[in-house]
Amino acid sequence: MFFTCGFYSLKKSTDSCCGINTIVLRDIVEKIKPRFTPSQELKALIKGLGVGIVIIDRDMKVLWANHASAALAGRHKCVKGSYCYDLLNKGRGPCKGCPSEKAFKTRNVERSRIHAGNTNAGGKYIELTASPVLDKKGDVAAVAVIYCDVTPNVEVENQLKEHRDRLQAVFDGIGDGISVIDRDFNIKRVNREILRIFKKKDFSDVLGRKCYEVYLQADKACDDCPAQRSFKDGAKGQLSKVWGGRFKEKRVFDISTFPILDSNGNVAQVIEYFRDNTGMLKLEEQILRYERLAGVGELAMGIAHELRNPIGNINASVQFCLDKYAVDKKLKRHLRVILRNSESANRIIKDLLDFAKPDDIVLKAGSVSKVLESACALVKTRCLKQRVRLYKKWPQRLPMVMLDARRLAGAFLNLILNALDAMPEGGSMIVASYLNKQAKELVVTFTDTGDGISGENIPNIFDPFFSTKKSGVGLGLSIAHHIITHHNGTILINSKQGIGTEVTVSFPVSHDLSGC
């Protein structure tokens, strides 16, 4: 729509600034001169807009300006003849990203937002809209610039951003995973804990993807999906789920879902709340294990005491016969078999007593690296015989931990021997140790290239008398686990059949202990 005012035509643009229409001057009969005077209708229109308007030439000098532009610049006199950037930029040169310069070049309407003055001393945010003014030939003769004070809007935006950042900090600070999905199961928002749980580097690895693809590695939603129930019924959903494939060890999550309603009361999105209950499950299993082992320990101690004396008598009697009497070779051979087996039984009884009586462990500050050196030295010959390459990897200085060197060396030796049993045809083994500063733990790992352990056997590997070896009694790993537990340590096994096994032992590090 066009308005005719004197010699000039005005085009009412649909572009807006601060909620008003932008006025674009067109079809100037001749080049704008200082004598330019708008008609009374145009004056009334410009005054009613309440925004600053100036017309500038290619040298950035003001040819005409309304009173609002002078007031916006903090001037009480006519600004005609001044450089436009002096109005807001106070003589510091053209504004960065000047829309007027762009409008002269592009012949298009250009916009930008600048800050005028000092924010600490009442500075303003001004939105500039520069419209080219064309002569009859279609060349850009001047540019009309609208100055709109958007300081209140910017302040509101900054307040909203501050509140949004605070909410985001709270959102990310929640220790459980939170995910927001739409009706198509697309992930719209997550907190940082979700990235940590599912081992994602960035939000872009998650947002916009299907929740069941990211969390379950599936091609469709699970049948018992609580989010489906929340979308359908608008009620809270609940599910406990076990993840195993994507994690090193089994993880258990409690998943709760909560509907988000739109203005019509319909479920638009659903919040998924992930709580990792693996630690609680492990604690329950550990308590049950301790109760079970306590009963086994009492039984083992009773059996050991009952058998120790008879086996001791057998051993002494056989030794007496061999020393006192002249027996033939055949009988001597049988007596020596009895002697060997009684000694073997005596060692088993000793292991039972060690398993049943861990209270003799005396902890004092010591060096784990020295304990590892002594354990590795004891298996050096066997490694050579089995063609197993043993690699030792740990820094020269490791923090000291509270330990019983003799008992811990026995535990480490059991773990190494168990690994060697899995490599009868040779292989390699790495014994390593390092400080996990984040967890404040000293970590020891035993990695072999043996046969590996089946998934069904791993939960039972530390149970007393459990063994997959023909000649095994099944107490070595139980004793090792018992000793490490009484060092306030943890022991985890990660194994794949045909590839090998990694045993990870972790000990807490005290701030009071210096490095060694």
Image (tube, helix red, strand yellow):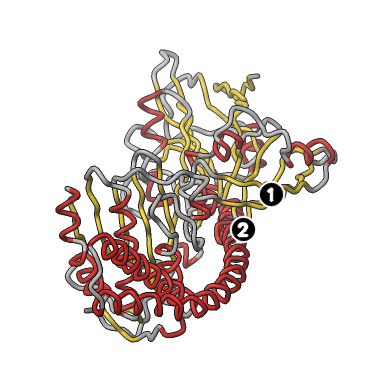
| Residue occupied by mark 1 | 240
Could you tell me the amino acid type at mark 2?
Answer: Asn
Q: Taking 225 as reference, is 489 above or below it?
A: below
Label 2 close to label 1 by CB (< 8 Å): yes
Task: In this rendered view, identify the residue nearer to me: 360 or 320.
Answer: 320
Q: Which residue does the image show at 78% across and 41% down from the upper left?
A: 230
Q: Residues within 10 Å of mark 2 (few under 14, many from 20)?
A: some
Could you tell me the amino acid type at mark 1?
Answer: Ser
Q: Which residue does the image show at 68% across and 30% down from the upper left?
A: 184
Q: Which corner quadrant holds the N terminus?
A: top right
Residue 447 lies left or right of residue 220; in this view the side is: left
Residue 503 lies left or right of residue 328; in this view the side is: right
Q: Taking 70 as reference, is 100 above or below it?
A: above
Give the tally of numbered discs: 2
Q: Is residue 209 visible?
A: no
Which badge, 2 or 1, is on the more N-terminal residue? 1
Task: In this rendered view, identify the residue nearer to me: 19 or 235.
Answer: 235
Q: Position of residue 469 (x, y in %)?
A: 40, 50
Q: Position of residue 202 (x, y in %)?
A: 45, 44
| Residue occupied by mark 2 | 277
Q: Disc 2 to disc 1, how far (Cα)? A: 9 Å
Q: Is residue 142 visible?
A: yes
Q: Position of residue 511 (x, y in %)?
A: 36, 82
**Secondary structure of residue under mark 2:** loop
Q: Taking 476 as reference, is 183 above or below it?
A: above
Q: Quadrant of residue 446?
A: bottom left
Q: Residues within 10 Å of mark 1 (few under 14, many from 20)?
A: some
Q: Position of residue 307 (x, y in %)?
A: 48, 75
Task: In this rendered view, identify the residue nearer to me: 441 or 419.
Answer: 419
Q: Taking 18 as reference, is 107 above or below it?
A: above
